[in-house]
Image (spheres, helix red, strand yellow):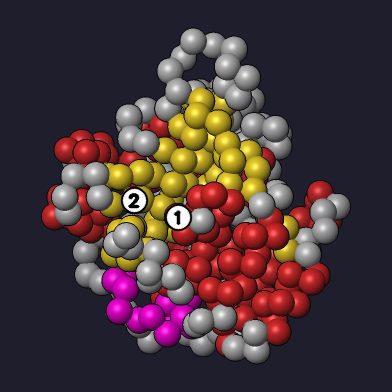
Amino acid sequence: MAPRKIIIDTDPGQDDAVAILLALASPEDVDVLGITTVAGNVPLDLTSKNARIICELSGKVDVPIYAGCDRPLGRDLVTAEHVHGKTGLDGPDLPDPTLQLQDGHAVDFIIDTLRNEAPGTVTLCPLGPLTNIATALTRAPDIAEHVQQIVLMGGAYFEVGNITPTAEFNIYVDPQAADIVFKSGIDIVVMPLDVTHKALVTKSRNDAFRSLGTPVGIAVAQMTDFFERFDKEKYGSTGAPLHDPCVTAYLIRPDLFTGRHINVEIETESELTLGMTVADWWGVTDRAANATFIGDLDADGFFALLTERLGRL
Ligand SMILES: [Ca+2]
């Protein structure tokens, strides 16, 4: 089978970095048409810089990188330096990038790329707030039929919220954008906290990254070392959850994941529950299913895949 054509839309982020590295290490499975950046974990200038740092680290410098929206559609940007550090990529000491951003806006790149590809052939992989994707779909509704699937990290049901008591960060930052995407009619696969909190980097899993002995393996180990402080303190978990790599791992090994095809709606108005993903996991409404909401994964299989692929870079 030909590799799946994908666009990674991202706000790196240590876990975004690992997701991107996994994709770049897997050319037989995914063809990365481009990487688009969005404001999220840190402001846009930093997410755009971090995306370039990651591509240089991987040695794959021919993937075009475009900067996108620097703020959510209808509200002020909320960032997460308390999780990811001041740079968004704290942990390893990586050099400033020499790789340049492409001219032009990420949203234009998404629109043009989709229009140039056959209907139903490009998968969008949002790893941050959905601002770029929603802007593209609003400006050019015709691109929806060119999308094969959207596989995104965001939301939560059983785990509820990580930035407010009821909202997951990516959805909370731009709930209006999320609402547009979830109502788009496109086939959506969601990696909520319910599954990503089961993708924990335990000490032995992190040792496996470090033992690769390569610049990529060591940098990933240092990133997760940094990232895990926050989650260990907050949740008392055994290690850092690798949220975003669930997206790229799903493209390579969907059999590692299980979920339910259900209705998911986004709360866009309530001050109390803004950005909540109202997921009808138990099928208690007659609202039509619009997303596959993943609930579980084979964590050992996931980390085995990750370690094997990262070892190639
Ligand atoms: Ca992210």
The residue under label 2 is which amino acid type? Thr
Q: Earlier in the sequence, mark 1 or mark 2?
A: 2
**Which residue is rendered at x = 17% and y = 38% of the image?**
142
Residue 99, position as x, y percentages in the image: 35, 82
Q: CA distance from mark 1 to mark 2?
A: 9 Å
Using residue 222 as the reference point, say whether residue 95 is left or right of it: left
Q: Does the magenta run of residues contain 141?
A: no
Number of numbered discs overlaid on the protein picture? 2
Position of residue 168 relative to residue 86, above or below, is above
Mark 1, other Cα within 10 Å: few <14 / some 14–19 / many ≥20: some
Q: Is residue 31 visible?
A: yes
Q: Decide if ligand 1 comes within 8 Å of the CB at mark 1.
A: no
**Which residue is rendered at x = 62% and y = 81% of the image?**
217
Residue 112, position as x, y percentages in the image: 17, 54
Quarter placement of the N terminus: bottom left
The residue under label 1 is which amino acid type? Leu
> Marks 2 and 1: in contact by CB < 8 Å?
yes
Picture quadrant where residue 14 is located: bottom right
**Which residue is rendered at x = 59% and y = 12% of the image?**
284
Position of residue 41 relative to residue 291, above or below, is below
Residue 43, position as x, y percentages in the image: 48, 60
Check disc 2 and report the residue beneath it: 123
Mark 2, other Cα within 10 Å: few <14 / some 14–19 / many ≥20: many
**Which residue is rendered at x = 60% and y = 88% of the image?**
214
Q: Which residues are magenta?
A: 54-67
Secondary structure beneath label 1: helix
Secondary structure beneath label 2: strand
- Is residue 312 or residue 236 the one in the foreground? 312
Check disc 1 and report the residue beneath it: 251
Residue 150 disc label: none
Name the mark nearer the viewer: 1 or 2: 1
Picture quadrant where residue 116 is located: bottom left
